[in-house]
Amino acid sequence: MKIYLIRHGAEDGSVRGGWSKTPLTEEGRAQSLTAAERLAKEPDADIARIFSSDLLRAAQTARIISDRLSVPVAYLPQFREVNNGVLAGMANERADKEYPGLYWRTLAFDEHYPGGESPHEFYDRISAAWGDLVTSVRGSGKDAALVTHGGVINVIMHIVDGMPYSNQTPSFCIGNAEYTAVEAHSCCFNCRNTISSKQSRVSQHISALDRRGDYGASGARVFPRGGERGKIHKGSGAAPRDSAHAVAPDSRA
């Protein structure tokens, strides 16, 4: 069983990302359509469920993929990008003037965005949500897809690889509408340290969706995964201009 991690298509790069409500650009829609076609042609893919961040740029990407694969999509706010508080959707020029030098990579691990999350809180949120999702996918016996953000995928890949996470040294970059697949049976070996023994809201939401019956690779790079080597399947999305923008939730994640 595989989980396909898909970054959303391109959005307006003139504003800060994070929890912004910016939609896909025309380029982003085209990227998403091409990614959907590539996923439809993946020889070993058997995607039965699509999950997505509910932020607009991810939700639109997920809907495009859902329509092509004829697979319903469920929106999980737990997989949103980092909450960058007052900076969400703010024009870059204004943000640079009012909050000079304030970027994701400049925050201390327990330092909050004004009105938002700290890197520590972001990591804990994604870690818990990812553990619940993996448990659900394992129980289903079918592949799944998660449409989300660059910063979220960066955290997940650190968890999958058992690597220590830091917002200041991002190590996994993925372009718009690119995707990678990880094996569900081997991708959450260290999540148990951050997940409560009680069923979380993510698990409860997925279970409710299960009961209702609805859910609201080429140019590969190699990346280590739990001591093994796993392929990064690139879609046709534009490659990030630099590693900071590729994974920084306060820019275009």
Image: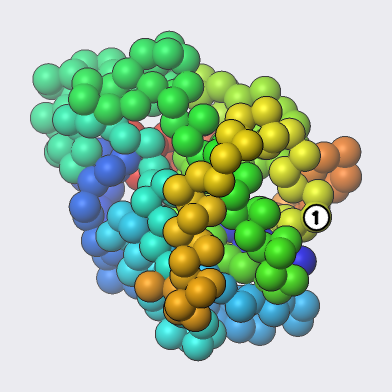
Please tell me which residue is depicted at 27% across the width and 64% down the height of the picture: 25
Closer-to-camera residue (184/58)? 184
Point out the residue furthest to the front here.
Answer: 198
Residue 166: percent from left, percent from top:
56, 22
Please tell me which residue is depicted at 51% across the width and 45% down the height of the picture: 200
Residue 89: percent from left, percent from top:
19, 42
Q: In the rendered image, which quarter contains the C terminus?
A: top left
| Residue 253 higher or lower than 123, as above or below | below
Is any part of residue 223 visible from this angle?
Answer: no
Question: Would you name the residue on which mark 1 appears?
Answer: 185
Residue 49: percent from left, percent from top:
56, 73
Report the side of 21 relative to 151 (left or right): left
Closer-to-camera residue (221/125)? 125
The answer to which quarter of the image holds residue 228 is: top right
Residue 137: percent from left, percent from top:
66, 63
Q: In the rendered image, which quarter contains the N terminus?
A: bottom right
Q: Alpha-carbon neighbours of circle 1 within 10 Å: few (<14), some, or many (≥20)? A: some
Report the side of 211 relative to 227 (left or right): left
Q: Secondary structure at mark 1?
A: helix
Please tell me which residue is depicted at 62% across the width and 45% down the height of the picture: 131
